[in-house]
Amino acid sequence: MPVPKSHVAIVLSLILFVSLFSVDVAYGDILLYDIDANESAWIAAKSGLVDAGSWDLDDLPDFGTNSADGPIGSGGGGLIPVGFLPDNVSLNTRFALPSNIFLMGPSNVIWNPPSNATMSNSAFDQFEVDFFTPVTAFEFVAISTGGTVTVTVIDDLAVSHAFSGLDAPIAGHRYGVIGTIGSTISMVRTSGNYNGIEGAAASFKSVPEPQSAIWVGLFLTCAALGRARSKR
């Protein structure tokens, strides 16, 4: 006995509807890019993403040798004014002791960095950039008085992704981290001898996929079901 066309339409519509919702089931990884070594690869990786908040510490006066109590967010702290950092960002160290954030600028007589930097105020602490709403990608300039850092990215599932032995001289080294296939970034942490980030930093987010196709699938399913019932 031939299968009624209405039943075929229902099955096809359900397949379309399920496939549209299953696109985001697969979960990705966190990748790190050495921007100074291959900037074009980073540009290609973040293509299609949109700005989610950025800042440049060199837009502020020379930090010299100072410190501040963390966390520092859009409400400001120390030499960082109110509204300078995006609402979605907080700078802190893992062990939030008083004056835990070291603010170092070009006039620092010991290290003389080329840019303003926010760093851990202890050789044994870790510097953290927290995102209240996870982002897809983050680019930054890593710095350490020891010359190298480990960058640990915490994703939205609280899974740690560590990248060790990365160059991070006083002059800074640019890196980018990005989530793939749905994974996003909740925190970026640097560890090393007096470590942190300097100069400019920027975060990016994905553009939501259009939902129109999903609604078309739902409409087709409901329509097919309605036709099948009316013929009974």
Image (tube, grey):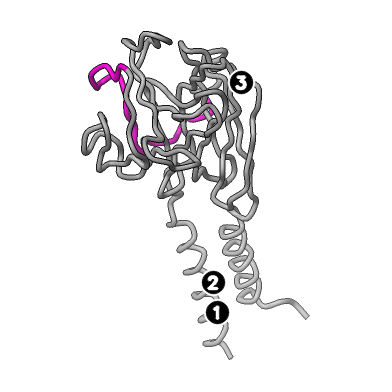
| Residue type at numbered disc 1 | Leu
| Residue type at numbered disc 3 | Leu
| Residue at image mark 1 | 225
**Label 3 Cα neighbours within 10 Å, binned few <14 / some 14-19 / many ≥20:** some
Residue 156 visible in the current orientation: yes
| Residue at image mark 3 | 166
Spot the residue most to the bottom: 232
Q: Nearer the viewer, residue 228 or 115?
A: 115
| Residue at image mark 2 | 221
- The earlier-in-sequence mark between 2 and 3 is 3
Residue sitting at 56 percent across and 46 percent down? 155
Q: Please provide percent x and percent y for residue 196.
A: 47, 27
The answer to the question of whether label 2 and label 3 lie on touching residues, with beta carbons closer than 8 A, is: no
| Cα gap from disc 1 to disc 3, whole angstroms | 58 Å
Relative to 11, say whether 157 is above or below: above
Say left or right for 1 vs 110. right
